[in-house]
Image: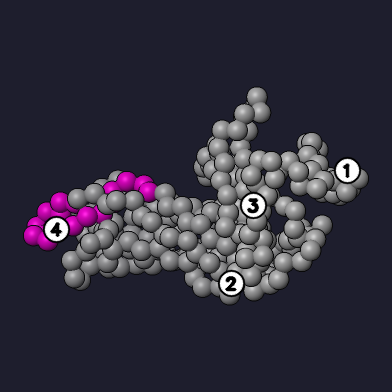
Amino acid sequence: MSVLAAFAERWGITYRLLSDEGSHAIRSLGLYNEHLAEQAAAHGVQAREHHYGVPYPGTFVLDEAGVIVDKWFEQSYRVRPSGAVTLEKVVGAGPAQAKVSAQSEANGIAARAWLADDSYRPYQQLLLHVVIEPAPGVHVYGDPIPDGYQALRIEIQSLEGLVVGPIELPTPATLVVPGLDDSFVGYERAIDVTIPFSINGRLGPVALGVSIVLQACDDTVCYPPAEIRLALPLDAEENIRD
């Protein structure tokens, strides 16, 4: 109990913490982590004696009555969602929750990228939001695209240790382009793309670079392919090892 009390005092934790000396409770619930050694080996390290006796790395979501309404688990104790990402999973998030953001525009297309976090810890899961909004009467092309045109593409610029999850665009709608016989699909309304990522290293403060490649057209003009670049600053924090 004294160890938990000291930990809570140091980190400003005001809610109750549960003590499970001997790991009896998590064993009875089937939550005792039997694969700690393999999880550590996957990251090239060896589990030490004091690492054992912990539950599987997971999160339980409780309602106001203390009833579990959701849960999820990770494959490794190292990889955990940030607090902001956990809240987003539970209650959702919008631009009002942005801690850092950047925006620009090109050829009638407004682009904005934002994060609900303004810092990262090594291996911490974060979520990048990219919002692309065509002006009225403007569209951008999607995939598949005929030769000679540019489909919408979002890329995250490389950083040492940066791991980016799948970048999944919404299904594009069929477009009718007057005067052209080719078949097109694309986007005429705003889309919000959520991209998971982590930085698996200690790089210090970084700028997360986002590249949006697109081709915009309206009823009279089809612009050349363009690239919108955005940069989001992230401070670095060390992992808590107490």
Residue named by callout 3: 57
Quadrant (top left, top right, bottom left, bottom right) of the N terminus:
top right
Q: Secondary structure at mark 1?
A: loop
Q: Which of the two discs, 3 and 4, sits closer to the camera?
A: 3
Which residue corresponds to the image point at 58% horizontal and 75% vertical from the top-left?
160
> Separation of disc 2 and disc 4 at Cα?
40 Å
> Separation of disc 3 and disc 4 at Cα?
48 Å
Answer whether residue 105 is visible to the viewer in this image. Answer: no
Nearer the N terminus, badge 2 or badge 1?
A: 1
- Give residue 127's position: percent from left, percent from top: 54, 54
Q: Residues within 10 Å of mark 1 (few under 14, many from 20)?
A: few
Q: Secondary structure at mark 3?
A: loop
> Separation of disc 1 and disc 3 at Cα?
21 Å
For badge 2, the amino acid type reads: Gly
Residue 182 magenta? yes
170 displayed left or right of 211: left
Reply above or below: 126 against 89. below
Q: Which residues are magenta?
A: 175-191
For badge 4, the amino acid type reads: Ser
10 displayed left or right of 238: right
Find out whether the residues at labels 3 and 2 contact each other: C-beta distance under 8 Å: no
Count of numbered tags: 4
For badge 1, the amino acid type reads: Met
Nearer the N terminus, badge 1 or badge 3?
A: 1
Q: Residues within 10 Å of mark 2 (few under 14, many from 20)?
A: some
